[in-house]
């Protein structure tokens, strides 16, 4: 592929992917071994969206990249976007899971009550939480989709810091 095709494919992939793409994923997609080439393409996409009055922007999340709507555009077109239906209680449960990564389901139920079982089922189905068995209970943590959806790095410490900042 030529540079124009690579730009088009990369931009489409960054927009369409359900998660931010790492340099390794981009190199594989474009069938190149050159990280420098990938970085040049990313910079070209960044400039295109900054200088062209685009409603989109290249977003870096940790060491991965995606294309998202600009905040000011998202605020205006938000009512037209599909909504994910998560109750206030499930959001509080999600915030607690995010803050206390690798929390057991039994500990979460102690803290929030029996409704968490329903919340956790919904959050797992939405792809925001993953669960693994630990004895007679389960251990919960957030997923890459959670981090991507909320514009965070998929790093437990960074997520905790951001939540602390938000809660003041």
Image (cartoon, rainbow, N blue to C red):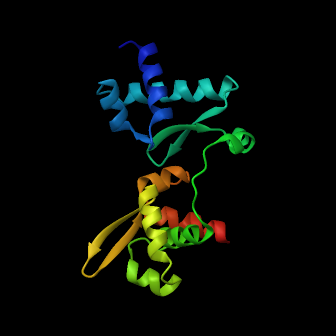
Q: Is residue 62 left or right of residue 133?
A: right
Rendering quarter of residue 150:
bottom right
Q: Is residue 20 left or right of residue 163?
A: left
Q: Nearer the viewer, residue 90 or 134?
A: 90
Q: Position of residue 66 (x, y in %)?
A: 50, 38
Q: Nearer the viewer, residue 94 or 21?
A: 94
Q: Position of residue 22 (x, y in %)?
A: 39, 40
Image quadrant occupied by the C terminus: bottom right
Q: Is residue 147 left or right of residue 2?
A: right
Q: Is residue 157 above or below residue 34?
A: below
- Tell me if residue 47 can be seen: yes
The residue most toward the bottom is 110
Residue at the location (67% across, 22% down)? 52
Q: Nearer the viewer, residue 44 or 79?
A: 79
Q: Is residue 63 left or right of residue 73?
A: left
Residue at the location (34% across, 73% down)? 139
């Amino acid at each position: 592929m030529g540079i124009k095709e690579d730009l088009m494919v990369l931009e489409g992939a960054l927009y369409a992917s359900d998660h931010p793409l790492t340099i390794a994923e981009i190199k594989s997609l474009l069938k190149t071994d050159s990280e420098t080439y990938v970085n040049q393409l990313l910079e070209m996409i960044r400039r295109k969206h900054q200088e062209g009055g685009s409603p989109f922007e290249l977003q870096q999340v940790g060491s991965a990249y995606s294309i998202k709507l600009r905040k000011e555009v998202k605020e205006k077109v938000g009512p037209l976007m599909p909504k994910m239906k998560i109750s206030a209680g499930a959001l509080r449960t999600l915030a607690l899971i995010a803050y206390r990564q690798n929390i057991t389901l039994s500990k979460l139920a102690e803290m929030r009550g029996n409704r968490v079982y329903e919340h956790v089922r919904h959050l797992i189905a939405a792809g925001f939480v993953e669960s693994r068995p630990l004895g007679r209970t389960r251990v919960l943590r957030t997923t890459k989709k959670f981090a991507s959806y909320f514009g965070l790095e998929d790093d437990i410490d960074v997520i905790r810091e951001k939540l602390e900042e938000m809660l003041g």
